[in-house]
Image (cartoon, rainbow, N blue to C red):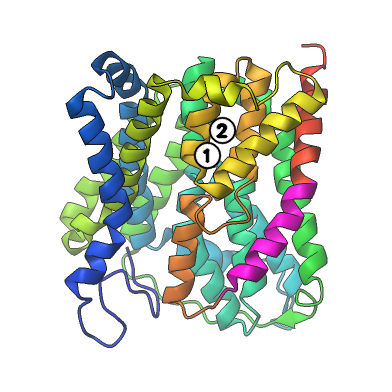
Amino acid sequence: MRRYPSDNRSGSDGTGRVRRPMKILRSFALPGILFLAGAFFLATGFLPWPDFLVLAERTVPILLFVVAMTIVTELADEAGVFRQLTDRIARLGVGSNGQGKVWLLWLFVVFLATVSTIFLSLDSTAVLVTPVVVLLAISAKLPPLPFALTTIWLANTASLLLPVSNLTNLLAQHQLNTTPVGFAELLWAPSIVGVLVPAAILWLGFRHDLRGTFTPAARGPVADRPLLVIAAVTVLLLLPALVTGIPVAFSAGIAAVFLLLVFAFRRRSALRANMLPWRPLLLTIGLFLVVQTLHSHGLAALLGRISGQGDSYLSLLQLTGLGALAANGVNNLPAYLALEPVAQSPVRLAALLIGVNLGPLVSPWASLATLLWHERLKALAVNVSWRGFAAAGFAAVVVVLPLAVLALWLSARLPS
């Protein structure tokens, strides 16, 4: 991926020195422990082999999709797709005096973060959109926090509409045995709430910072225009392919292989081993194995006593609240896996997704996207108070979740 100013992806500490091996090892500590724990459970039979095979059938295609989409988005960013997109966004609405309105720029960022999350996943938004949006604000001499917080809130709350938007959605799609269109038909109403209500809260919170005008920074040169065009066209063709019902791992895999071949000919230096999401993969596999082990030993029966029953509004809200609480307490992925067996209808499964997708706005570890987002901000020397982040997120969650569940409950009662 192209390196932005102060971006430490290369392993530098910012002074030219290579990071110490112990720091790298610490970053792999939790994912490695979870992976080894899961492998130990499987090797000792504590995780029964038949249960593991069922888990593997569900999750291996999802993990392949994660790898393929990471390659596509990383190489697209290396080609300059996201940089050029945000440069053009900054110039939309600029008047003849060369000045643009800050509130209009913010609305374009809302649109970009929403579309990126829906079609490319919340992690892609956190990793790829965050740097360019924050640098866009800094170059325009605007406070970066409103733009940074908008990006991560929508990375979570806009990740409800399509299976590819969130790893939890891909797991739920398998459980629902539905197409991307069928998935969207179930979740369209709370998805709208998940975009509009957080955006409205952000506007109210930052309305004073979003007044006035700004001068867009000078547009940088394109290093390799043919590569930029090829990557942009590949992403544009991939987006509709992800909602056709074709297995997403297949569509993303073809795009990834194509871009790898293109870069092998035009910019071989961009192909690096650290382009692959090693830590998220280890973490995800470990969580899959550990949670499945717990399910094999009665976790679902325990959770069934506190998750509510039926499809009434209050029962759905109870399940949503439990999902949000578990996501902020541990992480949204194990929260979903733990509670999936007690979500025994499509509407209850949708309510669970509302909790684990829209709820992770309070704790830093509630979703992997939030941790990745914070890493990008640190690399750009933008400081965020976790206390302030948690307070604002809690205020948003207590408003967004009941409204999203209400939208789900009402839409489920509409005649088909």
Q: Which residues are magenta?
A: 384-399
Amino acid type at image mark 2: Leu
> Where in the figure is residue 225, as x and y percent of width and height?
35, 63
Residue corresponding to mark 2 = 162
Amino acid type at image mark 1: Ser
Where's the N terminus, which quadrant? Answer: bottom left
Left of 354 or right of it: where is 52? left
Query: In this rendering, does residue 155 appear at all?
Result: yes
Q: Main secondary structure of the magenta part?
A: helix
Query: In this rendering, does residue 169 appear at all?
Result: no
Q: Secondary structure at mark 2?
A: loop
> Which residue corresponds to the image point at 69% horizontal and 38% vertical from the top-left?
321
C-alpha distance separating marks 2 and 1: 5 Å
Q: Nearer the viewer, residue 114 or 367?
A: 367
> Which residue corresponds to the image point at 38% horizontal and 54% vertical from the top-left?
229
> Where in the figure is residue 210, as x and y percent of width and height?
76, 73
> Which residue corresponds to the image point at 53% horizontal and 59% vertical from the top-left?
364
Q: Quadrant of residue 249?
A: top left
Where's the C terminus, which quadrant? Answer: top right
